[in-house]
Amino acid sequence: MKRPAFSTPRALRAPRSSRWVPGNHFELLENGEEFFPRVFQAIADARREVMLETFILFEDKIGQQLHAALLAAAQRGVEVHVLVDGFGSPDLSDRFVGSLVEAGVHFRIFDPGRRFLGQRLNMLRRMHRKIVVVDGHLGFIGGINYSADHVADFGPEAKQDYAVQVRGPIVAQMHHFTREAVLSRQERKRHQAAGITGRPHAGTAHAMFVTRDNQQHTNDIERHYRVALRAARSRVVIANAYFFPGYRFIREMRRAAKRGVDVRIILQGQPDMPIVKTAASLLYDHLQRAGVRVYEYCDRPLHGKVALVDEDWSTVGSSNLDPLSLSLNLEANVIIQDRAFNAHLHRRLSHLMEHSCKQVEATAPSRWNGLRLLRSYAVFHLLRWFPAWAGWLPRHKPEITLANPRTGAAEPAGSPAT
């Protein structure tokens, strides 16, 4: 078996639970204009099974198109499983869900929660993944939700985002994972006996499917990022919507820049939530003084969660680099070892930096004052300790509920949340 071109010293290797899987092909899908037609066509072509997880599903024009594709698949006998997050998708009508369930769709809701005085209080430990697996052979993963704000005609608030279409053996891991997330033990045994087998090699990319949960894989995605940063020799580009990572992550970025690596981050310049830019800007001085270049994307809100290191390593997925994604939410990324994919992603991000971003100028040393020094010190220690603090937050065990076939309302499904 050919070893991946990207290698690291034994002491820096990624978690042992993850292994490079060879023989995959990845295609970058930028924004809803490229993503939605591919997913809807894949569902239309499905013969046996569709597994779909998403944080947000709205009843807008995109949600209605997905609804039609899932409904048609179920009506022709395809087994369809859908998992949406109860916080991200709170207002789906009984009619919308009920028509899917009546057609045979297994529609599940992750931790629906209850409103108190009209407010949703179940905002912690969300199911933030965005995964589709069709017939066990074709997969999609990234940061794009099923809502109209992911296409350009939505207007100035349309999001800039990324996903990938996946073929090859790594899809088997995605398929297994999505089934484990929602199926009961009896259903899993039945599926295993009549499962979809054989994922032939589809390309030359090595890949890992990496998830984050609140049990055994609490920091896997962040650890893979830090391993790659530690091994970086020439370039790092990170484009992320919500950027407020931990102390060790920031430390690896600074160390890479100080040893001569060209480290660049693309963050929101026109954020969907103002606090996002405020929080990230607290880190600018600390990063820039080590040589990290900061860019703000100013055309519209940035929602992407992608990165590349050197000429081989890339990642695309649902995980932001903030406390929610790194310490609380359920996330999923793919890590890709492939020069061609890395080069294509680098071209797209370079185009973004050149045409749609402004580089944030570092503050002159002469303007450094005591207040800014105090702020930097406070942020430094907040980042250093926030993973431990996150463990103190409410740790209820969310449940996955199955929609009632007559009303579309959520009912306990007897399946534990991951």
Image (cartoon, helix red, strand yellow):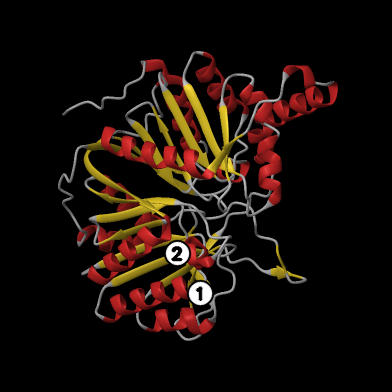
Dividing the picture into quadrants, the one containing residue 386 is: top right
Q: Which quarter of the figure is the N terminus placed in?
A: top left
- The amino acid type found where label 1 is placed reads Asp
Q: Position of residue 51 (x, y in %)?
A: 34, 62
Disc 2 to disc 1: CB gap under 8 Å:
no
* Number of the front mark, 2 or 1: 1
Instruction: Name the residue located 59 percent from the left edge and 74 percent from the top edge.
Output: 91
Callout 2 amino acid: Leu
- Is residue 123 rendered to the left or right of residue 341? right
Name of the residue lying farthest toward the top? 259
Residue in view at x 55 percent, y 67 percent: 89
Depicted 37 relative to depicted 282: above or below: below
Element marked by disc 2: strand
In x, y percent, where is residue 170? 27, 45
Q: State the residue position of label 1.
A: 60
Does residue 190 appear left or right of residue 52 in this picture? Answer: left
Percent from the top left, x then y, of residue 412? 52, 70
Q: Is residue 226 visible?
A: yes
Residue 83 tag number: 2
Q: Residues within 10 Å of mark 2 (few under 14, many from 20)?
A: many
Q: Secondary structure at mark 1?
A: loop
Report the disc number at residue 15: none
Taking the image as shown, residue 60 lies to the left or right of residue 347, namely: right
Task: Name the residue furthest right.
Answer: 370
From the viewer's perspective, is residue 385 above or below residue 276? above
Q: Nearer the viewer, residue 335 or 351?
A: 351
Question: Measured from the top left, where is residue 101 in percent x and y?
Answer: 41, 79
